[in-house]
Image (tube, rainbow, N blue to C red):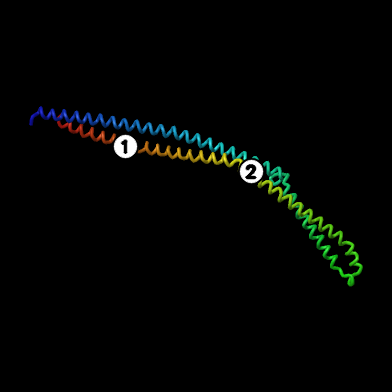
């Protein structure tokens, strides 16, 4: 075999290997740079998403605090907050129950007095007839007190419910705005996850390219050793 031809073949093969290695190294370096860029983008985007999430959470907290504060004031104003000493509903309920008890008692006395027979008990009949107006007045007074307590409670609850609806309406637009911004931020968070996935895939591909270069280098070194 011609030694010069063998050396020429070796030289050509070596040059091809070098070119292949250089191209592979360039591609591997490019892949590594791309991965680093994706990772930087993901980190930056994740920071923006986290800041936006914190801002939106703060806004929602402020809206909730404002809404609850207004509702607490409404409840206190109309005396329907059970935690307050000015819980008027409890007072009205006590008035209602007391008036109903008084009505039942007055009605029982009226019915008893009106049931006395003139023939069976003339004296009792006369005494009962004299007392009937008093018992009727007591019954009517108790009914009025009972109904007044009930109507006052109903009026307070109606006004509170109206106030709650008004607060809900007044905060609806702001809450809707926050929800839309949260949805947009969730979309951005999904984009961050996509960047992370792309960076991870790129990192794996760069690793495969490096392994291929190492194998090729090993083969080239083995071929060169044949002529050493």
Q: Which mark is residue 165?
A: none
Residue drawn 51% across the image and 37% down it: 53
136 with respect to 172 (left or right): right
Residue at the farthest right position: 123
**Of the two numbered discs 1 and 2 in the rendering, the one whose residue sits closer to the viewer:** 2
Give the image location of residue 12, x and y in percent.
16, 29
Q: Which residue position is annotated with label 1?
A: 205
Q: Depth check: 106 or 172 in front?
A: 172
Residue extending furthest left?
A: 1
Q: On the picture, is 167 further left or further right than 89?
A: left
User: x and y percent of residue 70 in the render?
Assistant: 65, 40
Query: Residue 72, image x and y in percent?
Result: 66, 42
Which quarter of the figure is the C terminus placed in?
Answer: top left
Distance between the alpha carbons at the discs numbered 1 and 2: 59 Å
Closer to the camera, 8 or 106? 106
Q: Quadrant of residue 79?
A: top right
Number of residues whose C-alpha sits closer than 10 Å to that of mark 1, classed few (under 14), some (14–19) or many (20 or more): some
Q: Is residue 188 above or below residue 14?
A: below
Q: Which residue lies at the image location 58% right of the left edge and 42% below the top edge?
A: 172
The correct choice, above or below, for 104 with respect to 163 in the image is below
Instruction: Name the image quarter holding the N terminus.
Output: top left
- Residue at 24% x, 30% y is 21
Sequence order check: which comes first, mark 1 or mark 2? 2
Q: Residue furthest bottom?
A: 119
Mark 2: which secondary structure?
A: helix
Q: Are marks 1 and 2 in contact (CB under 8 Å)?
A: no
Closest to the observer: 175 or 204?
Answer: 175
Q: Which residue is the site of mark 2?
A: 166
In what element is the residue under mark 1? Answer: helix
Which residue is located at x 34 percent, y 30 percent?
33
> Total marks drawn?
2
Tell me if mark 2 has few (under 14), some (14-19) or many (20+) residues whose alpha carbon lies within 10 angstroms of its own. Answer: few
């Amino acid at each position: 075999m011609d030694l010069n031809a063998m050396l020429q073949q070796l030289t050509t093969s070596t040059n091809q290997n070098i070119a292949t290695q250089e191209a592979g190294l360039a591609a591997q370096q490019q892949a590594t740079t791309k991965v680093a860029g994706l990772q930087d983008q993901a980190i930056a985007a994740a920071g923006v998403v986290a800041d936006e999430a914190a801002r939106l959470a703060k806004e929602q907290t402020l809206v909730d605090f404002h809404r609850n504060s207004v509702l607490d004031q409404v409840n206190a104003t109309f005396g329907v907050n059970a935690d307050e000493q000015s819980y008027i509903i409890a007072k009205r309920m006590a008035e209602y129950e007391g008036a109903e008890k008084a009505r039942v008692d007055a009605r029982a006395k009226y019915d008893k007095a009106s049931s006395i027979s003139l023939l069976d008990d003339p004296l009792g009949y006369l005494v009962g007839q004299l007392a009937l107006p008093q018992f009727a007045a007591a019954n009517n007074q108790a009914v009025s007190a009972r109904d007044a307590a009930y109507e006052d409670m109903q009026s307070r609850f109606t006004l509170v419910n109206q106030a709650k609806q008004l607060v809900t309406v007044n905060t609806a637009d702001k809450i809707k705005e926050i929800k839309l911004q949260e949805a947009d931020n969730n979309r951005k968070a999904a984009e961050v996850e996509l960047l992370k996935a792309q960076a991870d895939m790129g990192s794996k591909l760069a690793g495969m390219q490096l392994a291929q270069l190492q194998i090729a280098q090993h083969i080239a070194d083995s071929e060169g050793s044949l002529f050493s």
